[in-house]
Image (cartoon, rainbow, N blue to C red):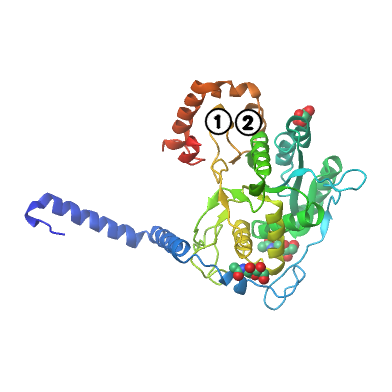
Amino acid sequence: MFINFRRIHKFQCVQLLTTGLILCMVMVCWEDLDHHVVSHVKSYTYRYLINSYDFLNSSFYVKSSRKYGSNSADGASLVEYPYLINHAGKCKSRDGKSWDDVLLLLFVKSPPENIEQRQAIRDTWGNESFGWSKLGVNVKLVFALGIHPDVWKRSKVQSALLQEDRVYHDLIQQNFVDTFHNLTAKLILQFQWSHKYCPQAHFLMSADDDIFIHMPNLVKYLQQLLSSQSRATDLWVGHVHRGSPPVRRKTSKYHVPYELYPWPSYPDYTAGAGYVVSGDVAAKLYQATLFLNPSVYIDDVFMGMCAKVMGVSPQEHVYFSGEGKAPYHPCIYDHMITSHGHASDVRSLWHAATDPTAYGSSRGFFGNLYCRAVRVMLLCLPYYQNTYSCMAAFT
Ligand SMILES: *[C@@H]1O[C@H](CO)[C@@H](O)[C@H](O)[C@H]1NC(C)=O
Ligand SMILES: *[C@@H]1O[C@H](CO)[C@@H](O)[C@H](O)[C@H]1NC(C)=O
Ligand SMILES: *[C@@H]1O[C@H](CO)[C@@H](O)[C@H](O)[C@H]1NC(C)=O
């Protein structure tokens, strides 16, 4: 390109130099930023240009089934922690026959001490009788737990759990320590359990205990999938992370060392806060857990690896949230499926979001127009906290 140097004034020269200097300083001094940017560029390049994850099968393959915690020489560990609390008949009727009409098996990952969150879920979006009587579908709710990490508190917490389970019959507990780094064990529990005790469920959902699920919207969406035949299989839907790089900063909760995962990019996965898989995908993922080494302790990533080796890819749904909390507005309630980061407000949000009179404003041509405008305001303007992408305003 031809540049007319006489046109660059002295003032512009100084400006250019200063900008360059500042950029250099940022690059040098702010190693973290540099690192972050570089690792994202590397991972996206890998994801979009090479996109081959063949190494998963060879590097994470475990030849024979093993027992958990057996600490075999190659560090691999598998098969099944013993159940401490279980409900083998959850998906069966009183006479012991399997229900073949379970629409959704809902797994909520909950640490043992979160009694109040579990109660709030039972009273709101996890209410099985609401599913039956208001939505006309069979939704089964169970909580997935390990044992309390603190040995001193363990027996007290455990007896509280047994007490809770005697009342509600919805806890599934295996004998592993319930910690962040054992979340992969919890993921495997879900696929093992559904394979063994509820293989007939049309869909399986995994959710955190601090999310909100708009059950009527979710059920409507799943029923539409079922009636469309083909789309009720080979389904894994949620908020998709594409081409994420492993975090190498040692201070991060999500730190993964090179020894564990040397490649620049993870296979695509959905945010673990809430996603849905169809029954056939749940069965495939279960198969994958039998031969993949579960050493990658970020459960969402492990799920992505299982799916990749089984040839399943995740689909984006704009109303599944990743980390963010949905804006409180009837025009959002109309569409939302999940929202993250709820605790004390679950009950009030449930009442507001499932109140049929709340939707009055979104009906008709002008109602639609109004809601579209509200959604653009709430989701597309940068000064609001974004949960759903701007695209969600236009669906
Ligand atoms: C669950 O839903 C049923 C049916 O709508 C309702 O009668 C019941 O009160 C709900 N349970 C709780 C704990 O809110
Ligand atoms: C996971 O659970 C197992 C079995 O209880 C335990 O031996 C192991 O230390 C736990 N791992 C972590 C990282 O907490
Ligand atoms: C990985 O191995 C499994 C089981 O051996 C096989 O079904 C799958 O197709 C393999 N995936 C790839 C990407 O090679």
Quadrant in the picture for residue 33: bottom left
Residue 297: x percent and y percent?
Answer: 63, 62
Q: Is residue 172 above or below residue 392?
A: below
Q: Residue furthest right?
A: 95
Counting from the top left corner in percent of width and height, residue 69 is at 74, 69
- 235 vs 120: above or below: below
Around disc 2, counting alpha carbons within 10 Å, would you say few (fewer than 14), some (14 to 19), or many (20 or more)?
A: some
Residue occupying the point 63% across, 21% down: 357
Residue assigned mark 1? 328
Question: Circles 2 and 1: CB distance less than 8 Å?
Answer: yes
Whether label 1 lies within 8 Å of ligand 1 gets the answer no
From the top left corner, tell me how far across and down residue 252 is, in percent: 53, 58
Dot 1 crowding, Cα within 10 Å, few <14, some 14–19, many 20+: few
Quarter of the image with the N terminus is bottom left
The amino acid on which the numbered mark 2 sits, given as a three-letter code, is Leu
**Picture quarter with ligand 1:** top right
Q: Residue furthest bottom?
A: 73
One can see residue 148 in this view:
no
Q: Which residue is mark 2?
A: 349
Q: Label 2 vs label 1: CA separation?
A: 8 Å
Please, what is the three-letter code of the amino acid marked with disc 1?
Tyr
